Amino acid sequence: MFGAVIHAPGDVRYEQRPDPEIIEPTDAVVRTVAACVCGSDLWRYRGLAPVPQPVPIGHEFCGVVEAVGDAVTTVKAGDFVVGGFNPSDNICPVCRKGATANCINGDHYAGCQAEKIRVPLAEGTLVATPGMPEADLIPSLLALSDVMCTGWHAAVSAGVGPDTTVAVVGDGAVGLCAVLAAVQLGAPTVIAMSRHAARQQVAREFGATDIVAERDEAGMAAVRELTNGIGADCVLECVGTEQARLQAIGCVRDGGNIGLVGVPHGDLPVNDLFWRNVGIKGGPAHCRTYLPELMEKVLARTINPGLVFDLELPLAQIGEAYAAMDERRAIKSLVRP
């Protein structure tokens, strides 16, 4: 089979790789219907995370089960499935508390930007649709493998609800899905912070009530102006850079909460957070916990997170899929084998 391999910053290649096989009885092999490039993949592509040797890349997918190990009973060959980006058994003591991203027995994928994928812990990781989904739902189902669940996690972590004001820092796919999550959770005021017209449009379609294009102190002041001068009750930080984290801290009100889901790069000013009674919660999304509810919403066409995919390419053009996101010519690139 063929798949993506990152060799060095700026160098992702479409190469022949070994066909995945059932190794453990808890494994499944999935034929990829769609995969995509994640903003976190760009850390290595941009040289901000190490690439010590060529390695398969990617962690988001949906597809059709081709084979399962003897211990897998919840999915079978022929099922259309979505798998969260963090495989989990869904039965360990931590998973039973809903924290599936921190599964005691958690595993990882060997690159999902590929024609086929070996899925470890398939029993607890994969969620099947009831029959084959309609073709136009594929992008939104793919979004459930990471960005929609991650945006949802940001909103849940920050305590978003019907009586909260929300500001979202970051206008990538995760930030836009966080806007959608906040709207779905009933927030009456959802402020999207974005300087880019195409991303602002998606935020509006997802239900953002306000757009703030300014950054730094001007952006913080604009958020305060929209929230009775005090800042947002809940701020969803969906980037991970030090600048974005400081932006989030500057936008949250005293006593408010920040949902932190951007992969962290930089420290937090803990003393400031302490004296302001600002709560911080977040981390990798508990995809397996959120998947059933969010899949129901997609299949019912209540939400359409697939709008974040504004570029679709053949898997063979994976290098361009990365370049387009790196150069901000695309919000999120979808690839099909």
Image (spheres, grey):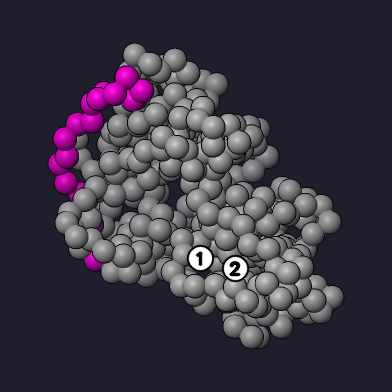
Q: Is residue 201 visible?
A: no
Tell me what residue is drawn at x 44 percent, y 56 percent: 332
Residue 254 among those drawn in magenta: no
* Residue 233 vertical placement versus 84 (above, below): below
- Residue 318 at x, y percent in the picture: 28, 52
Give the alpha-carbon distance from disc 2 to disc 1, as whole Å: 7 Å
Tell me what residue is drawn at x 80 percent, y 73 percent: 227
The circle drawn on residue 124 is none
- Residue 219 at x, y percent in the picture: 65, 80
Regarding mark 1 in the picture, which secondary structure is present there? loop
Q: Which residue is mark 1?
A: 239
Regarding mark 2 in the picture, which secondary structure is present there? strand
Q: Which residue is mark 2?
A: 169
Q: Foreground: 306 or 272?
A: 272
Magenta portion: prevailing SS class? loop
Q: Mark 2 vs mark 1: which is more N-terminal?
A: 2
Asked which quadrant contains residue 47, the reply is bottom left
Q: Foreground: 85 or 99?
A: 99
Callout 1: 10 Å neighbours few (<14), some, many (20+)?
many
- Residue 207 at x, y percent in the picture: 70, 56
* Residue 335 vertical placement versus 197 (above, below): above
Q: Which residues lie in the magenta part? A: 9-28
- Residue 264 at x, y percent in the picture: 46, 64
Tell me what residue is drawn at x 74 percent, y 66 percent: 256
Tell me what residue is drawn at x 32 percent, y 19 percent: 25
Callout 2: 10 Å neighbours few (<14), some, many (20+)?
many
Residue 26 among those drawn in magenta: yes
The amino acid pointed to by label 2 is Val
The amino acid pointed to by label 1 is Val
Quadrant where the image shows the C terminus: top left
